[in-house]
Image: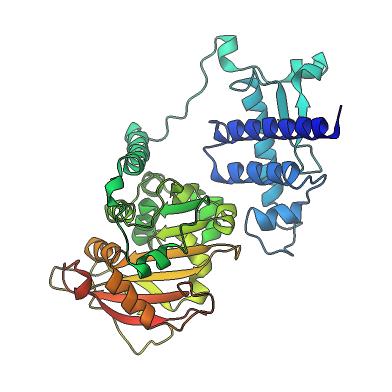
């Protein structure tokens, strides 16, 4: 066979293995856990794209689970635990949904580099040891009925709503945008590159308000907060809801000229991962309490959102200048509102992240209009230093909204500066 023929055969083999990984990652056995899905995709990419023959635990902990590059693997077993869970899920997949797959994907113990084996070449005793799917034994699979049916319906509704928003967005809205609007959104929507729009986790935000607890991103990602929850708390925190205000903001964002709907992926915060935040451009909706993926960017920003329990509202605090107060924000129609927007590099330094948060739905609605308005963005741009590459510079800004007005000219920029 010619060298060209060998290369073509190798390419076809790699493609078939990538398609297998995609099927496994999308299956019910893996897709329900964002962490296991992220682990499978990272390990497979290292083997198929980088031709890695060996993958070490410390690398996986750093790249997939956000641990420091030199963290102590002897005291932190997060990789070992999730690798063990993934091995079991792979066995379940190839014994049920993937029973007809000609290739079997395995993660050997002692090395996290996946291997691909031809099922037809497996010894009969190994094939016999594979778990038998429940339906093959005429035994109904066990179903977890702990969550009410309403939660499942709510989740399906959220998914279908997000899908329809993408599909039904009016293409006629692609009118010519102003140069500043195009410049701004070009930082987030790049041709042929994925951009994640990450909705907030309203249930987790409400849980923190009611319990008085504050969750870290590590707790949120590893689901540590779910351990030993009282039944009353678990009924709240297990629900999968995004706030109405952020869903409305999502709809407006998809109408802005320059926002590439074709390469936009709508993600729920609970299903997001460190791997994606390092690799993709992203729009994070909500403050750190409702969207914990904002947390890694807080050291670069001065604005924090504080919850006023007596009024039931959030208001912004400038930690870099505590002398200024914005505590009158929110509450009733007569109060002013605020929304904050920040443009920063993503965690991998190879893309960008936009963070949008506000005192309430009205302010958030005004924020969406501000981000689509040429004069508003041009005014914000004029307050920032010029960048060498003429790109829209990184910044954080706090904007005041008068009452329920969403007209960009009624929005006042009260803070605009370069992040740390």
What is the x, y in percent for residue 327? 27, 78
* Residue found at the far top of this picture: 138
What is the x, y in percent for residue 281? 51, 58
* Residue found at the far bottom of this picture: 323
What residue lies at 51% left-to-right and 64% top-to-bottom? 352
Please tell me whether residue 97 is drawn above or below residue 307 in the rendered image.
above
Whether residue 391 sits left or right of residue 309 in the image: it is right
The image quadrant that residue 9 belongs to is top right
What residue lies at 53% left-to-right and 31% top-to-bottom? 28
Colour convention: rainbow
Along the line of sight, which residue is nearer the eye, 241 or 116? 116
What residue lies at 54% left-to-right and 55% top-to-bottom? 280
Whether residue 225 sits left or right of residue 153 in the image: it is right
Q: How many marks?
A: 0
What residue lies at 59% left-to-right and 36% top-to-bottom? 25
The image quadrant that residue 135 belongs to is top right
Q: Quadrant of the N terminus?
A: top right
The image quadrant that residue 87 belongs to is top right
Please tell me whether residue 29 is drawn above or below residue 100 in the rendered image.
below
What is the x, y in percent for residue 401? 22, 73
Residue 92 visible in the current orientation: yes
Along the line of sight, which residue is nearer the eye, 124 or 143? 124
Residue 288 visible in the current orientation: no
Please tell me whether residue 85 is drawn above or below residue 391 in the rendered image.
above
Whether residue 216 sits left or right of residue 365 in the image: it is right
Along the line of sight, which residue is nearer the eye, 204 or 310? 204
What is the x, y in percent for residue 386? 47, 82
């Amino acid at each position: 066979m010619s060298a060209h023929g060998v290369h073509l055969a190798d390419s076809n083999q790699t493609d078939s293995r990538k398609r297998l990984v995609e099927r496994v990652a999308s299956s019910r056995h893996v897709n329900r856990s964002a962490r296991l899905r992220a682990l499978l995709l990272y390990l497979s990419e290292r083997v198929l794209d980088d031709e890695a023959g060996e993958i070490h635990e410390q690398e996986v902990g750093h790249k997939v689970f956000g641990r420091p590059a030199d963290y102590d693997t002897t005291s932190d077993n997060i990789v070992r635990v999730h690798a063990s869970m993934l091995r079991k899920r792979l066995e379940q997949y190839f014994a049920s949904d993937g029973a007809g797959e000609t290739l079997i994907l395995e993660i050997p113990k002692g090395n996290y580099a996946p291997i691909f084996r031809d099922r037809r070449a497996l010894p009969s005793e190994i094939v016999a040891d594979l778990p038998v799917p429940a339906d093959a034994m005429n035994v109904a699979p066990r179903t977890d009925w702990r969550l009410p049916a309403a939660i499942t319906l709510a989740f399906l509704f959220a998914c279908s709503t997000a899908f329809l928003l993408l599909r039904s967005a009016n293409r006629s809205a692609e009118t010519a945008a102003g140069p500043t609007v195009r410049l701004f959104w070009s930082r987030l929507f790049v041709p042929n590159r994925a951009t994640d729009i990450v909705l907030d986790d309203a249930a987790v935000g409400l849980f923190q308000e009611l319990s008085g607890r504050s969750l870290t991103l590590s707790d949120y990602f590893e689901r540590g907060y779910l351990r030993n929850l009282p039944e009353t708390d678990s009924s709240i925190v297990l629900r999968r809801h995004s706030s109405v205000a952020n869903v409305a903001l999502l709809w407006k964002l998809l109408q802005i000229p320059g926002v590439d709907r074709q390469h936009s992926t709508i993600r729920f915060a609970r299903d997001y991962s460190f791997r994606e935040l390092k690799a993709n451009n992203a729009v994070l909706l909500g403050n750190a309490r409702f969207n914990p993926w904002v947390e890694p960017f807080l050291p670069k920003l001065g604005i924090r959102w504080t919850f006023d329990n007596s009024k039931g509202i959030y208001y912004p605090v400038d930690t870099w200048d505590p002398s200024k107060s914005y505590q009158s924000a929110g509450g009733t129609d007569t109060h002013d509102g605020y929304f904050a927007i920040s443009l920063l590099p993503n965690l991998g330094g190879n893309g960008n992240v936009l963070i949008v948060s506000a005192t309430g739905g009205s302010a958030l609605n005004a924020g969406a209009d501000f981000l689509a308005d040429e004069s508003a963005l041009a005014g914000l741009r004029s307050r920032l230093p010029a960048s060498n590459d003429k790109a829209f510079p990184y910044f954080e800004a706090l904007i005041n909204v008068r009452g329920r007005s969403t007209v960009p000219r009624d929005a006042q920029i009260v803070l605009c500066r370069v992040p740390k």
